[in-house]
Image (cartoon, rainbow, N blue to C red):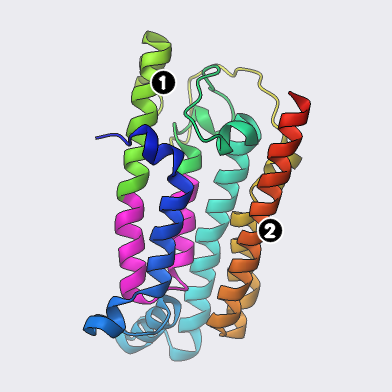
Amino acid sequence: MGATKVEFRLRMLINMIIIILGFWSPWIEAWGIGRRISLLEWLALELSRSGVVSFAMATPVVIVAGALVAAIAAVLRVWGSAYLGPTTVQHAQMLAGSLMADGPYRYVRNPLYLGLWFMFAAMAFMMPPTGALFTMVFGTIFLLRLTLGEEAFLTGQFGEPYKAYLRAVPRLMPRLHSSLPRSNAKPHWLSAAISEINPIGLFLILTVLSWSYDNLLMLKALVVTFGISLVVRALQGKSNNVDS
């Protein structure tokens, strides 16, 4: 079942609630479910205990894995935004301008939602294990609802051309090759990079600050990055209003 218009309009708030609950994990103190330890640290301990890698290598392996997940998120978000445009990405309502079959949209129908899923996964490394599980389960469910809701909306707007696109391009598992013709859309890389400060910042946090082994520092940096992204979003909104 697809998301309602209210869910779509409040998608940013709902995603924030899911992420905050994942970091907070109130059930740990309330019911004793789980441990107050980051998933990054927990995974490193489990890897070393299982003998898969040595204790000295366990943490670097997990840090690199987290950074790679964050890198995928940043690439998908910036790439998708560059072709779709920050205005459409951030709009509170579902929009139907024209069919997009260029950039990442030739290989996967929902690169932005897929990128957001990888953002959830990257942030999960900083959450308690039970919080990470909560975020991934409920985040995945909500993103699937958003995806189904948008697809139903666009099918109603475009009809058969969009149905053909649905048949040609997978929903969330990208293809390595595409037979679709390019639309000759011009990507706007700078505006996309500015609008996607959040995933870029998340990548830098996991790439650089993880080596400090200070989860609180990483959380503070994540909050600062999110605050900056809100300011940028507001400024872009004002700029779009002036241009229009």
Say if 151 sits above or below 212 in the image. Answer: above
Quadrant placement of the C terminus: top right
Q: Is residue 228 visible?
A: yes
Mark 2 is surrounded, within 10 Å at the Cα level, by few (under 14), some (14 to 19) or many (20 or more) other residues, namely: some
Query: Residue sitting at 44 percent across and 31 percent down?
Result: 109
Residue 126: percent from left, percent from top: 47, 73
Q: Is residue 81 left or right of residue 180?
A: right
Label 1 SS? helix
Secondary structure of the residue carrying tag 2 is helix
Query: Quarter of the image holding residue 137?
Result: bottom left
Counting from the top left corner in percent of width and height, residue 190 is at: 76, 41
Q: Which residue is mark 1?
A: 154
The rendered magenta stretch, by its main secondary structure, is classed as: helix
Amino acid at circle 2: Ile
Indicate yes or no whether the magenta region holds residue 177.
no
Along the line of sight, which residue is nearer the eye, 193 or 59? 193
Residue linked to disc 2 = 228
Establish if 242 lies above or below 227: above
User: Would residue 164 be visible to someone looking at this image?
Assistant: no
Coordinates of residue 238 in the picture (x, y in percent): 73, 38
Q: Nearer the viewer, residue 33 or 164?
A: 33
Residues in magenta, as a range:
114-140
**Vertical comparison of 65 with 77: above or below:** below
Residue shown at the point (66%, 22%) measured from the top left: 185
Which mark sits nearer the N-terminus, 1 or 2? 1
**Quick check: is 120 in the magenta stretch?**
yes
Classify mark 1: residues with Cα within 10 Å, few (<14), some (14-19) or many (20+). Answer: some
At x 42%, y 38%, the residue is 8
Instruction: Between residue 66 and residue 21, name the one nearer to us.
Output: 21
Q: Amino acid at mark 1?
A: Leu
* Disc 1/disc 2 C-alpha distance (Å): 32 Å
Q: Residue at x 37, y 18 (%)?
A: 155
